[in-house]
């Protein structure tokens, strides 16, 4: 541990961060890290652009994007990295099986740092540097932090983006449980906003500003409105935003630690992008940015390295009937989930009937000790309730799986174990079945139709 103050260590953080970012920029093409599949809901065909989710370290993801020509292409980057809370964060999953409800905590992400602020700044610098490369000349970056690191990250941002490109520090104020008797309760986050150039996209958004005593002013030329609270005018947004957190009872809650509200993302996206802009979030968590970007007709790219994040994002997108999206995963070739045992037959030349028999899984890797017994009970009695979703490519061509048929778990019941899929299937046709469990682990299995039956030919 160094005895130097963090300010004295900044030059070293900056020079080593630059070196790391340059290494990524100069790396020769390396596609072996990622393998993709396309989630292709039939109900929503989308356009020629396909949104992208990467499960992996964002440093590698950004390197890949730069190699693929995304330099200067992103109009908005929003990031909500870990805050240096010095804790490990969890998420929750609910499973109902045979009328019994189970709740498990699962690891979401680690926010502990061996050398505290020094390690944190070393992590963030090269990433911010690469984000500047990816930002378009009309682009804006929002960096969401809190009191723990905002001052130091602002110094790094000034160095990378230039002080002259600082736009705002937005204060997001909220109500939440927990108060302190020793200091003022901390109820706000800080969002640093920088642009790439002075020619940035900025579509001012408005909010209600209630009149004094909620009465009309009747000033000439000022348009006034009334709601159940009283009279108000519409004013352009200020830099202090009062927006509710995603609380325990909130409709949008997906039980992922530090999920941000859609209303917050809506303001940011509407202000700093136009329709068809590409919006990116490299610390995506539960995927709020992509969900809102898509609703507002923007294109999106997201990444996160966590399994729980990946499963939460897939589920959220599928439940929202999203447009098709690519899903890439670092080292995807490794089988990391359990084994889904299925049987299937093709009948009447039009229906593939699939029966899910069992999910064989080793839970030791994924679950905390205190939940083991319950989890074992669940596996014995209803192993299929651990399957989060299944995607099927009915005619796999050996390239990128196109998962047009999808089945996702409802938190109130397991997937139906019998599926009937209508489709034009020929003898010998290859059928790829991809699946992920509630821990975010998964595999692909390749089947073939032989004499009307589904025969496993390869665990992919
Ligand atoms: C605070 S959460 C983001 C929450 C998100 N804004 C939402 O609304 O759900 C931070 C996320 O950053 C991810 N993360 C941390 N370091 C990362 C890295 N090097 N590459 C990719 N993701 C990372 C964590 O897995 C975690 O999900």
Image (spheres, rainbow, N blue to C red):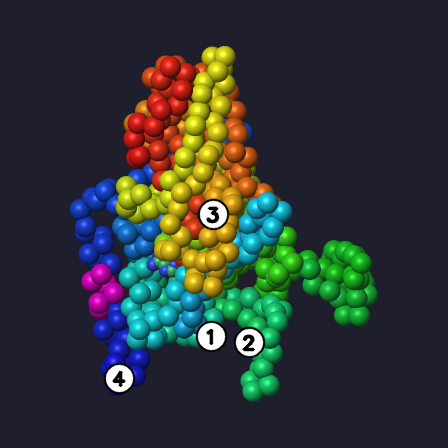
Q: What's the residue at 69%, 60% (across, down)? A: 208
Disc 2 designates what residue? 186
Q: Residues within 10 Å of mark 1 (few under 14, many from 20)?
A: few
The answer for how far apart the CA atoms under marks 2 and 4 are is 29 Å
- In-front residue for pair 350/78: 350
Q: Secondary structure at mark 3?
A: helix
Mark on residue 147? 1
Disc 4 designates what residue? 4
- In-front residue for pair 363/334: 363
Q: Position of residue 381 (x, y in %)?
A: 52, 45
Mark on residue 379? 3
* Residue 120 visible to the viewer: yes
Residue 248 belongs to the span the image colors magenta: no
Q: Identify the image quadrant of the C terminus.
A: top left
Dividing the picture into quadrants, the one containing residue 164 is bottom left
The answer for how far apart the CA atoms under marks 2 and 1 are is 9 Å
Label 2–label 1 contact, CB within 8 A: yes
Mark closest to the chain's N terminus, 4 or 1:
4
The answer for how far apart the CA atoms under marks 4 and 1 are is 22 Å
Q: What's the residue at 43%, 31% (across, down)? A: 342
| Magenta-highlighted residues | 15-20
The answer for how far apart the CA atoms under marks 3 and 2 are is 42 Å
Image quadrant, ligand 1: bottom left
Residue 19 belongs to the span the image colors magenta: yes
Task: Confirm or reject: label 1 Cβ below 8 Å from ligand 1.
Answer: no
Q: What's the residue at 52%, 28% (across, down)? A: 419
């Amino acid at each position: 541990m160094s005895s130097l103050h963090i300010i004295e260590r900044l030059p070293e953080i900056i020079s080593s961060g630059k070196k790391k970012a340059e290494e990524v920029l100069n790396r020769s093409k390396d596609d072996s890290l990622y393998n993709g599949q396309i989630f292709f809901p039939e109900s929503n065909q989308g356009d020629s652009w396909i949104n992208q989710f990467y499960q992996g370290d964002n440093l590698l993801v950004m390197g890949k994007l730069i190699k693929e020509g995304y330099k200067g292409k992103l109009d908005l980057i929003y990031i909500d990295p870990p805050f240096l809370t010095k804790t490990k964060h969890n998420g929750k999953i609910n499973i109902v099986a045979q009328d019994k409800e189970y709740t498990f905590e699962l690891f979401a992400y680690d926010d502990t740092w061996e050398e505290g602020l020094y390690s944190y700044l070393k992590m963030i610098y090269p990433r911010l540097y690469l984000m500047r490369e990816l930002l378009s000349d009309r682009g804006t970056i929002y960096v969401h932090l809190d009191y723990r690191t905002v001052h130091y990250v602002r110094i790094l941002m000034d160095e990378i983006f230039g002080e002259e490109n600082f736009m705002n520090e937005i204060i997001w104020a909220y109500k939440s449980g927990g108060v302190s008797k020793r200091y003022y309760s901390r109820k706000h986050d800080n969002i640093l906003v920088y642009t790439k150039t002075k020619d940035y996209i900025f579509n001012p958004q408005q909010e209600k500003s209630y009149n004094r005593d909620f009465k009309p002013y009747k000033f000439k030329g000022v348009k006034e409105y009334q709601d159940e609270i009283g009279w108000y005018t519409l004013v352009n947004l200020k830099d202090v935003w009062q927006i509710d957190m995603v609380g325990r009872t909130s409709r949008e809650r997906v039980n992922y630690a530090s999920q941000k509200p859609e209303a917050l993302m809506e303001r940011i996206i509407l202000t700093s992008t136009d329709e068809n802009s590409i919006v990116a979030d490299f610390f995506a968590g539960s995927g709020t940015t992509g969900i809102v970007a898509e609703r507002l007709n923007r294109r999106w790219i997201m990444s996160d390295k966590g399994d729980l994040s990946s499963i939460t994002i897939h589920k959220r997108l599928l439940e929202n009937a999203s447009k098709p999206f690519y899903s890439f995963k670092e080292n995807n070739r490794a089988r990391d989930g359990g084994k889904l045992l299925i049987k299937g037959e093709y009948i009447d030349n039009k229906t593939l009937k699939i029966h899910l028999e069992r999910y064989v899984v080793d839970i030791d890797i994924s679950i905390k000790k205190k939940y083991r017994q319950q989890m074992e009970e669940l596996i014995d009695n209803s192993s299929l309730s651990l399957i989060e979703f299944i995607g099927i490519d009915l005619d796999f061509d050996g390239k990128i799986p196109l998962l047009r048929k999808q089945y996702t778990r409802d938190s109130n019941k397991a997937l139906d174990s019998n599926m009937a899929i209508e489709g034009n299937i020929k003898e010998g046709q290859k059928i790829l079945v991809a699946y992920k469990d509630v821990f975010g682990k998964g595999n692909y299995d390749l089947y073939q139709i032989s004499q009307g039956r589904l025969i496993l030919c390869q665990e992919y």
